[in-house]
Amino acid sequence: MPFSWFACFEDAAEPDGEPGALSAIDHERLCDLLSAARGLLRAQIYTPAHAGGPFADDGPPPRLVLQADFAELPDLEAAIAADGAFAPLTLPAEWPSLAGTTGRHQTMLARIFAVPEPRPAPGTNRACSYLVHYPGHAEDLNAWLRHYLRHHPRLMTTLPGVRAIEIFTRVDWCDGMPWQRADFFQRNKLVFDSPAALTAAMESPVLEAMRADYRRFPPFAGGNLHYPMHTDVVHGISEATFYNWKASTAA
């Protein structure tokens, strides 16, 4: 299973309450910076999308989320060292469209779950992801993970139009970045073709089964946050190859 690094740029909003947009220039430069990391399997850029459903009011989304996947933890840690490939991300003057944001980051272990209709390889590198964060803590993390990983992904796979499911859990890691280290005890990612497809899934009857399982979760604090995000795969092996690789290494 690969290791995933998340960087979130948060707490910036325009006067109308909407997060500022990532400029095309900064997007292009991010693609170049991310793709330069040694050992990188895949990098993705997430920017806010509008989608409906029962979790549409979880507060302002991050202006930008980055995900970088590595096969080996030392390669990831090298990228986020003080002189690593991703160190320029910490220089505010270099990224005008991220002015006013605060960076937080976390490294996690990625777990892949097979879906009935994976995202087709040809066509486009753009999708819509539902990023779900669990920022608090579970009273008994072992009990939480045993229940969650055994039951909830199986329900997720029945969501109409879901193209990929990834669940991320904590690991110990080191870095040299000046940012705050997030300590979410879990993150999830559900991938759909578009915001409309995500909305349809969140309004489907499957959600009632997921809510019923939610009520059976072992005790945890801190709630969860749901953010629909446009998703650009900016570097790495193809989506189909990546998910096949992850599935084979997880078997």
Image (cartoon, rainbow, N blue to C red):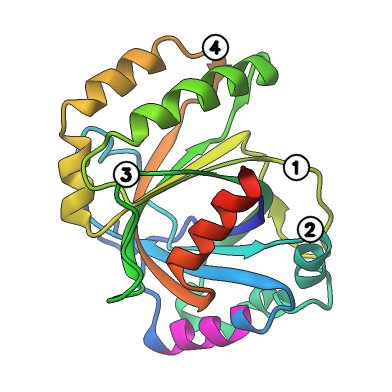
User: In the rendered structure, which segment of residues is drawn in magenta?
Assistant: 25-34
* Residue 137, position as x, y percentages in the image: 63, 24
40 relative position to 176: left or right: left
Q: For the residues carrying marks 3 and 1, which lies nearer the camera in this image? A: 3
| Residue 214 appears in the rendering | yes
Q: What residue is shown with label 2?
A: 73
Q: Residue at x 70, y 75 (%)?
A: 86
Mark 2 surroundings within 10 Å by alpha-carbon count, few (fewer than 14), some (14 through 19), many (20 or more):
many
Marks 3 and 2 sit apart, C-alpha to C-alpha, by 30 Å
Residues at marks 4 and 2 touching, judged by CB atoms closer than 8 Å: no
Q: Secondary structure at mark 3?
A: loop
| Residue 8 appears in the rendering | no
Vertical relation: 74 (above or below) 108:
below
In this rendered view, identify the residue nearer to me: 73 or 51: 73
71 relative position to 210: left or right: right
Mark carried by residue 116: 3
Label 1 vs 2, first from the N-terminus: 2
> Label 3 sits on what residue type?
Pro
Mark 1 surroundings within 10 Å by alpha-carbon count, few (fewer than 14), some (14 through 19), many (20 or more):
few
Vertical relation: 106 (above or below) 185:
below
Marks 3 and 1 sit apart, C-alpha to C-alpha, by 29 Å
Q: For the residues carrying marks 3 and 2, which lies nearer the camera in this image? A: 3
Label 3 vs 4, first from the N-terminus: 3
Q: What residue is shown with label 1?
A: 171
> Label 4 sits on what residue type?
Pro
154 relative position to 94: left or right: left
